[in-house]
């Protein structure tokens, strides 16, 4: 847990979030500024700065993050219509919160490439 990290503080319950799934090692909650009808962030409860760091430290945890995203897609009713699952990484990737998170987006047709 990093005291300064927004998502660690959400895991700790210090900052409110709309949690849609709470598993032993991952947490899924709605993005505060949704870019699609369904926009959920899936994070590891342990602090890792980005997805590559999760992979380096604990490859199984990266699998768990994706497995949680698939469960949430089913729960949110977008498993059949389709969705996008993405880890923004670093400055050019548009990462602003440096605690690894998978964006799960769906509920409308998504353009490719994104802006
Ligand atoms: P990224 O730009 O990939 O680092 O994504 C960070 C995401 O976190 C953005 O989509 C923000 O809207 C979202 N976000 C920031 N603060 C919060 C919060 N307190 N609760 C939920 N989502 C948040
Ligand atoms: Zn953190």
Image (cartoon, rainbow, N blue to C red):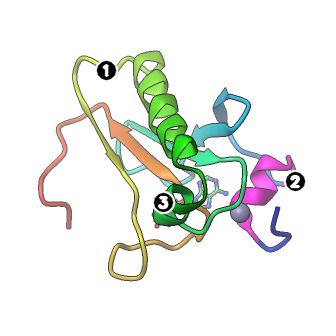
* Number of the front mark, 2 or 3: 3
Which residue is at 87% across, 53% downward?
14
- Within the image, what quadrant is residue 113 found in? bottom left
| Residue 51 image point, x, y percent | 48, 60
Which residue is at 63% across, 47% downward?
44
- Within the image, what quadrant is residue 22 found in? top right
- Tell me, yes or no, whether the two marked residues, 2 and 3, touch with CB atoms within 8 Å: no
Q: Nearer the viewer, residue 68 or 19?
A: 68
Left/right placement of residue 26 relative to residue 54 reads right
Please tell me whether mark 3 sits on a helix, a strand or a loop: helix
* Number of the front mark, 3 or 1: 3
- Tell me, yes or no, whether the two marked residues, 3 and 1, touch with CB atoms within 8 Å: no
The residue wearing badge 1 is: 79
Quadrant of the displayed image that contains ligand 2: bottom right
Q: Nearer the viewer, residue 17 or 4?
A: 4
Which of the labelled discs sits on residue 14, or is there none? Answer: 2
| Residue 53 image point, x, y percent | 54, 65
Which of the marked residues, 2 or 1, is nearer the chain's N terminus? 2
Separation of marks 2 and 1 at Cα, in angstroms: 31 Å
Separation of marks 2 and 3 at Cα, in angstroms: 24 Å
Please tell me whether mark 2 sits on a helix, a strand or a loop: loop
Left/right placement of residue 114 relative to residue 83 reads left
The residue wearing badge 3 is: 51
Q: Nearer the viewer, residue 86 or 52?
A: 52
Q: Residues within 10 Å of mark 1 (few under 14, many from 20)?
A: some
Number of dots carrying numbers: 3
Which of the marked residues, 2 or 3, is nearer the chain's N terminus? 2
- Within the image, what quadrant is residue 60 found in? top right
Q: Residues within 10 Å of mark 3 (few under 14, many from 20)?
A: many
**Magenta highlight on residue 34:** no
* Magenta part of the chain: 5-14
């Amino acid at each position: 847990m990093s005291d300064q990290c927004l998502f660690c503080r959400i895991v700790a319950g210090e900052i409110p979030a709309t949690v849609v799934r709470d598993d032993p090692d991952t947490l899924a909650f709605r993005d505060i500024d949704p870019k699609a009808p369904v926009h959920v962030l899936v994070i590891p409860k342990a602090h890792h700065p980005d997805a590559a760091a999760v992979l380096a430290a604990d490859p199984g945890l990266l699998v768990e993050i994706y497995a949680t995203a698939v469960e949430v897609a089913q729960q949110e009713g977008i498993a059949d219509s389709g969705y996008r699952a993405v880890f923004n990484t670093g400055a050019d990737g548009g990462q602003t919160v440096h605690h690894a998170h998978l964006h799960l987006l769906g509920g409308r047709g998504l353009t490719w490439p994104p802006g």
